[in-house]
Amino acid sequence: MEESTAGGRTVTLKDLASELGIHPSTVSRILHSGSDVARGAASVATAERVRELARKRGYSPDPQAAGLRTRRTHLMGVIVPRLSDLVLAIMYEGIDEAAAELGYSTFVMNSRDDPEEQRRKTDSMLARRVDGLIIGDAHLDSGLLRELAARKVPFVLMNRRVPGFPSATCDDVLGGELVAEHLWGKGHRNVAVIAGEPYASTAVDRTAGFVDRWRALGGRIPRKAVVWSRFDTAGGREAAETILAHCNPHPTALFAVNDFAAIGAMGALRSHGLGVGRDVAVVGFNDTSLAAELPIPLSSVRSPMLDIGRTAVQLLKGVLDGRKVESVKLKPVLCVRESSAFGNAV
Amino acid sequence: MEESTAGGRTVTLKDLASELGIHPSTVSRILHSGSDVARGAASVATAERVRELARKRGYSPDPQAAGLRTRRTHLMGVIVPRLSDLVLAIMYEGIDEAAAELGYSTFVMNSRDDPEEQRRKTDSMLARRVDGLIIGDAHLDSGLLRELAARKVPFVLMNRRVPGFPSATCDDVLGGELVAEHLWGKGHRNVAVIAGEPYASTAVDRTAGFVDRWRALGGRIPRKAVVWSRFDTAGGREAAETILAHCNPHPTALFAVNDFAAIGAMGALRSHGLGVGRDVAVVGFNDTSLAAELPIPLSSVRSPMLDIGRTAVQLLKGVLDGRKVESVKLKPVLCVRESSAFGNAV
DNA sequence: TCCGTCTACCCAATCGATTGGGTACGCCGT
DNA sequence: ACGGCGTACCCAATCGATTGGGTAGACGGA
């Protein structure tokens, strides 16, 4: 007979039970219930013997079997646009840690922000019988979330929010405001925004926060100075090219809603002979580990990515426990560096 | 009664069977066995009725139950140093794709290259009853692998290799050689290596490939010009500082075994007033998406990260199917960019 | 007519843990 | 001496899919 599961011979409850001459159910109760053992499950002596043997034999319960009976897998499904996006990767680290602390394991899948894939991955998670989902790729206009809610699938959103659903995000509006105040304070009056994808609340909120605050400060910002783009370096580069082509005189400061887009924009500026930080200030968002390490260190809004992940897990746990949960917005902080440290003549 | 599993009411084999007035086992055989249905499982007509109903009711088999019986979870466990390392994140994307194609799902966990954590995460994977492991954080001196092999846990290595175990890696020695030839050809004669962590085969092989080839070309490379370091930007920066402090005259070219270390080194050079590409050539490794986008684009050895991930899955599948598998080394390609494009006076 | 052979199913055990409902025994108070 | 009550267990069903071993009925050939 082939032993197919990894790890070879595994010890079962029954093994422990028969070795001790007691019934498996008794063993289960002892090992399962933390300390309500005192309340009628078994004698202290037996409990000790069982725990001792379990340790000695390296017993580890089969989650398949337990889940089959209890209808809970202690699995959380996580869906992100792509894990090779540093921002999501770090949030996932937070998820992984927090989930482990609660005794959950996590699946991650990439949807590449494609609605088709989102649906496929969601289904595939549910087919695996996850207890709930953490959705990191929510689109503002998606019907998928409403469907999931109708099917009573427990889920929470992460990174991006959608009104009506619980989410763990950065306070992106505030983040945009911080940048507006910073650049205004440095004397810039002609600015442009690399705004990201319009289906993502991160992009929309950061842009709105910036633009609204800018106008509240008395600034002007023409429509063509707000350019929607992809989140990666290539997207940022293209957006910067567009801005340079259409805005005359060119802006003295750029706000990119994402560090990678900001890096792309820096490249574009450079190939137009414009000095980042000198001729044009640039501010990014997320403060990924690269921002500070660039040859011209990039100013960026630091968002608490690890905590966003951790919070998402806590929210989902709340939902799974049947509690009503409220969305959480975590505070960002602006880190000013060389790319926007110098003032502009007013 | 609470419906706890995500997705609410689920259809079971028995539901389908009783609705059609046949036995669950018949339904199972029809749905399970691709086309050997013809061979005695059921009539074509019944098979069609079953498949039709399964589709209509949205039947999806419970992997818990199936796994309990078959002792196979169709789960692969993946362990990496950290997923927020772009290199590993991309390999994981390859894994995810390839695993999905084979009907497997994957767990990922971060070990932070800490032996303690490696062990913990491995155990936790096995407790989840994964069918096998893809280990992306193997240390050359680790006893863990030998233990796993002794316990007959099916596993393969990825990214880093360890003699005696099957692995999917880049041909790192060749990668190092490519860099040596390139820099030699550009006329450099005084070079240094930022060598990475000595417990990782990637670091050791890339360094060895470089150094051996360099000497074969007739070059000299003193011991103090090879500095072991962490893989991140901070590590690269420190290593570059060390090199600049101890090598006099300073080298005209640096080879960092990792792009992030290379970026850190570029920062160090810059703060010493040395122009990257002009005064000192820099070459990295992996060709992560950032390399080409840096203000001074970074030369880098492109390693086929996605394919390495995909290959690892295929190897593990082979092991799970009981086949003998051979390690695979995928060919890297050198991408020359501005950071090392200019020659050095011979 | 009888036996063999398919075809198209059915039956029941099984995987390992969980859980609602027993039950035997001892001890206590009266 | 007897009812009552805890304590410390045991029993058996259950979750959903899988699988080795039947079996009834049809059909064919000798």
Image: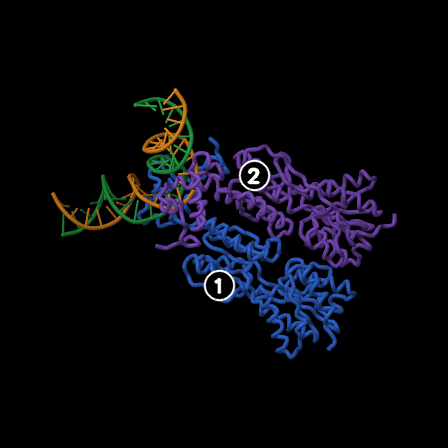
Chain colours: A purple, B blue, C orange, D green
Depth check, mark 1 against mark 2: the one in front is 2
Does dot 2 land on a helix, a strand or a loop? helix
Q: Residues within 10 Å of mark 1 (few under 14, many from 20)?
A: many
- Residue drawn at the location 74% of the way across and 43% of the way down: A176
Q: Kindly indicate whether the residue at mark 2 contacts the one at mark 1 (C-beta within 8 angstroms).
A: no
Q: Out of A197 and A176, give the one closest to the viewer.
A: A176
| Residue A306 percent coordinates (x, y) | 64, 47
User: Distance of mark 1 from mark 2, alpha carbons?
Assistant: 39 Å
Amino acid type, mark 2: Lys
Identify the chain of the residue marked 2, using the numbered disc in the image: A
Q: For residue A161, what is the image quadrant? A: top right
Identify the chain of the residue marked 1, using the numbered disc in the image: B
Q: Is residue A308 visible?
A: yes
Total tally of numbered discs in the picture: 2
Q: Residues within 10 Å of mark 2 (few under 14, many from 20)?
A: many
Q: Say which residue label 2 marks.
A: A317
Q: Is residue D22 above or below residue B80?
A: above
Q: Say which residue label 1 marks.
A: B166
Q: Is residue B146 left or right of residue A118?
A: left
| Residue A310 percent coordinates (x, y) | 61, 44
Q: Out of B313 and D29, give the one closest to the viewer.
A: B313
Q: For residue A271, what is the image quadrant? A: bottom right
- Residue drawn at the location 69% of the way across and 61% of the way down: B263
Amino acid type, mark 1: Pro
Q: Is residue A144 visible?
A: no
| Residue B205 percent coordinates (x, y) | 58, 68
Q: For residue A2, what is the image quadrant? A: bottom left
Which dot marks residue B197?
none
| Residue C13 percent coordinates (x, y) | 31, 43
Which quadrant of the rendered structure holds the N terminus of chain A? bottom left
Does dot 1 land on a helix, a strand or a loop? loop
